[in-house]
Image (cartoon, rainbow, N blue to C red):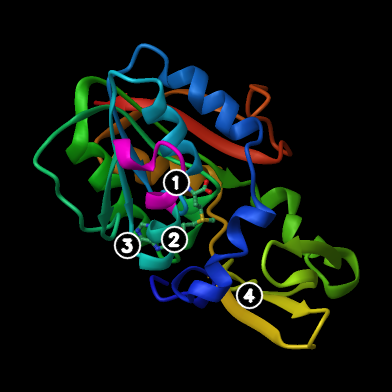
Amino acid sequence: MTSDKLYHDPELAAFYDIENGWTADSEYLKTMATGRTSILDLGCGTGLLAAALAQDGGKRVVGVDPAAPMLDIARQRPGGDRVAWIEGDARAVRLNETFDLILLSGHAFQVFLTREDQLAALRTIAAHLSPEGRFIFDSRNPVVTEWQEWTPVESERVIVHPKLGEVLAWNDVRHDPDTGVVEYDTFYRIAVDGRTFSARSKIAFPSYDDLASMIAEAGLVVDQWLGGWDGRPLEAATPEIIPIGRRL
Ligand SMILES: C[S@@+](CC[C@H](N)C(=O)[O-])C[C@H]1O[C@@H](n2cnc3c(N)ncnc32)[C@H](O)[C@@H]1O
C-alpha cells in the first residue's frame, strides 16, 4: 500500500496535481477549519489543502504522508513553508500532540485495505484528537460501484503536463468481490515520444456498517454522516460516506 508507484514514483506523482484540483471537498474542509487552530491532515499527498489551510495564518497545520515525492511537491507550493510535513504512516504515526481538526481527504482512507489497517488509522485519529476536536474523512460508497466507470473506454482523457506536453491518460480496473478491494491501473502516454508511465494501485471500499463498527471500536463517535461533499446527508446510494465525529 505505502509503496504505490502512483505516489512514490516522482514522474507519476507529478501528474497528481494535473488530475486533482481544488474541488467541493477542499471547499467543505476549508469552511470546517474556520476557527480551528490545529489541523492534522493524514495522507496529505501534494498538500494543496494543508497549504491553503496554513495560509489563513494562526493555525498549526501538520501533513503526514509516506510518499516522499508527494511531500516534495507539497513543500514547494505557495504556503508549503507554513506546514509541518512529516514523512510517515497514518497507521502508526504518533506525534505527542493533539489537534482540533483531523482529516483525511481525497479518499485517502481507502488506501487502507484491511480491517486491521483501517482500525489502525482510526486509532491514530483517536490518539491525536483534542477533547473538543473533530475528525472527518471520505470513502466512496461501495453501493454505487463507481469503479465500474474506471474502464479504458470510459476513463480515457487528454491532459497537459507542463513539461511533457499533451498526455493520453486512462485507467483499467478489477474488483475482487470476496475482499471488496478494487485494483486499478493508471496509464499516462506522452504524445510527443510515446513513453508510457503506469502504476497499479489497490483501494478498499468499506461499507457503512464496517465503518460505523470500526469507528466505535477505535473510541470515536460520529455526530453526522454525510453522503456527499455538497453536504447532503448519507443515504443508501449517496456517492460518498463521510463521517464527522469526535472522541468518545
Ligand atoms: C488519493 S491521495 C489523497 C491525497 C490528498 N489527501 C488529497 O486530497 O489530494 C492518497 C494519499 O494517501 C497516501 N498514503 C498511502 N498510504 C498511506 C499511509 N499508510 N498513511 C498515510 N498516507 C498514506 C498516498 O501517499 C497519497 O498521497
Q: Label 2 amino acid? A: Met
Query: What is the distance, in whole Å, between disc 3 and disc 1 at their CAs?
Result: 26 Å
Indicate the position of residue 109 as horizontal and vertical percent values: 46, 51
Q: Upstream in the sequence, badge 1 or badge 2?
A: 1
Q: Is residue 103 above or below residue 17?
A: above
Query: Quick check: marks 1 and 4 in contact, CB under 8 Å?
Result: no
Where is the C terminus found, in terms of image quarters? top left
Query: What is the distance, in whole Å, between disc 2 and disc 3 at their CAs?
Result: 25 Å
Location of mark 2 (residue): 70
Query: Quick check: marks 3 and 1 in contact, CB under 8 Å?
Result: no
Q: Upstream in the sequence, badge 1 or badge 4?
A: 1
Query: What is the distance, in whole Å, between disc 4 and disc 2 at their CAs?
Result: 28 Å
Task: Give the camera-side residue of 208 and 20.
Answer: 20
Location of mark 1 (residue): 47
Horizontal side, residue 24 vs residue 72: left or right: right
Q: Which residues are magenta?
A: 74-82
Location of mark 3 (residue): 116
Q: Upstream in the sequence, badge 3 or badge 1?
A: 1
Picture quarter containing residue 80?
top left
Indicate the position of residue 205 as horizontal and vertical percent values: 57, 57
Classify mark 4: residues with Cα within 10 Å, few (<14), some (14-19) or many (20+).
few
Q: Nearer the viewer, mark 3 or mark 1?
A: 1
